[in-house]
Image (cartoon, rainbow, N blue to C red):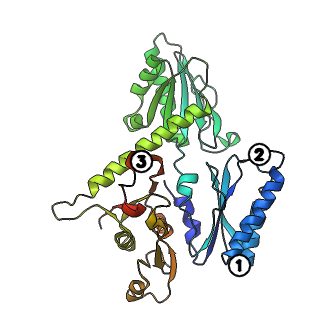
Amino acid sequence: MELAFLHPLYEHPGSWASAYVDLSQHDEDMDHRRHLTAEAVSRRLRDQGADEATCRAVYDTVEGLRHTSEPYGRAVFARDGEVVLQVPLRQAPPDGLVHWGTLPHVTPLLDLAGEDPVSLVAYIDRTGADFELRSALLHEEAGQVTGRQWPMHRAKASDWSERHFQLKVENTWEHNAREVAEALATCQAETGADLLILCGEQRECRSVHEQLPKHLQDRVVETAHGIGSRLLPREVEDIRARHVRERILAEVDRYRAARTPDEERRAAAVEGVPQLIEAAREHRLAELLIRPDAPDTHREVWIGEDPDQLAARRTELRNLGEQHSWPARADDVLVRAAVVTNAPVVSLTPVLDQTGDEVAAGGLGALLRWK
């Protein structure tokens, strides 16, 4: 998961409030229930030592969500009486996920808001294709190859730029397949879709697939479907979830291979808090792997004001010349180090049934970059 959007959380030192708010229930009691949620969240923060201004800011924000139609929930991060960042969730969070600490508690985002590939679905027949954009929070028409407008940027439907693709009248499907593939590749480039789902008869889907550029081949899934029908949300979610699992398993294989030392007895992967802290301090994290709620994620480590001022023990940080230090959770410290050095973070939750706890001892591991 790319976490560049979290940069605002690491621009200022100081204690942070992190609240994951469930907005998944929509019924006649919704307004009252969300009011109680706002009170409960602020009370839990206050009990953990949060200042009154920050408790009030979080309360006002959650109270302001009483009438929202969001399907799952929202993560709210605040400090010094100001809400700095809000993140829509793609799963409802567990009750009581509220944290006050030295760093924002962002690890739950890996499962609650992460790995949500935007899918470009193409409903293909012999004369062209209709396109849709689908994700956990998105379902928008993306136009047709036959010349109708389609969106060109990942924004609201009213904000898309307009472009026309007109299929010439041809007697062969091969020509149409080339046109569909070209239009699909163009739409993918403009929308940034992570996954291409080709939906239709096997022959038509295969023809389009073969015409797509090589760099898109590993993003394609073919699925048989009747002409004129649309994929149900559950069907799209199953395809997207399978794609996520396959991508994570590929990273797990890379990690396993990288743990084997080379001829110079250097391994390109490490696990365990002390080794990870050292790698993070040297800006050598290439990719961080996490099993949320595993033993080492809760482990206390020490940090200074800057992201590279971190140590497994407080005395170690003092020996490095840092006079001011604070305790923090190991997972939040390492995620901060990954974010500020543009290293992706991968949650192993979707593949635990296939890998168990054998990957990343204690719940934390990383692929390394060499200086």
**Marks 3 and 1, how far apart at CA:** 39 Å
Does residue 74 appear to the left or right of 306 in the view shown? right
- Contact between marks 2 and 1 (CB within 8 A): the answer is no
Of badges 2 and 3, nearer the viewer stands 2
Q: Give the crowd class for mark 3: few <14, some 14-19, many >=20 residues within 10 Å.
A: many
Q: Where is residue 89 in the image (x, y as percent from the top left)?
A: 63, 52
Q: Quadrant of residue 282?
A: bottom left
**Marks 2 and 1, how far apart at CA:** 32 Å
Q: Which is more toward the observer, 137 or 101?
A: 101
Does residue 228 appear to the left or right of 81 in the view shown? left
Badge 3 or badge 1: first in the primary sequence: 1
- Of the residues shown, which amino acid type is indicated by label 2? His
Does residue 147 appear to the left or right of 274 in the view shown? right
- Of the residues shown, which amino acid type is indicated by label 1? Asp
Badge 2 or badge 3: first in the primary sequence: 2
Residue located 75% across and 60% down the image: 37
Badge 2 or badge 1: first in the primary sequence: 2
Of badges 2 and 1, nearer the viewer stands 2
Does residue 300 appear to the left or right of 158 in the view shown? left
Q: Give the crowd class for mark 2: few <14, some 14-19, many >=20 residues within 10 Å.
A: some
Residue located 34% across and 70% down the image: 275
Q: Mark 1 points at which residue?
A: 51
Q: Mark 3 points at which residue?
A: 248
Q: Where is residue 340 in the image (x, y as percent from the top left)?
A: 47, 67
Mark 1 element type: loop
Q: Where is residue 34 in the image (x, y as percent from the top left)?
A: 78, 56
Q: Name the residue under label 2.
A: 26
Q: Which is more toward the observer, 115 or 163?
A: 115
Q: Where is residue 305 in the image (x, y as percent from the top left)?
A: 51, 80
Q: Which is more toward the observer, 360 or 86?
A: 360
Residue located 47% across and 70% down the image: 330
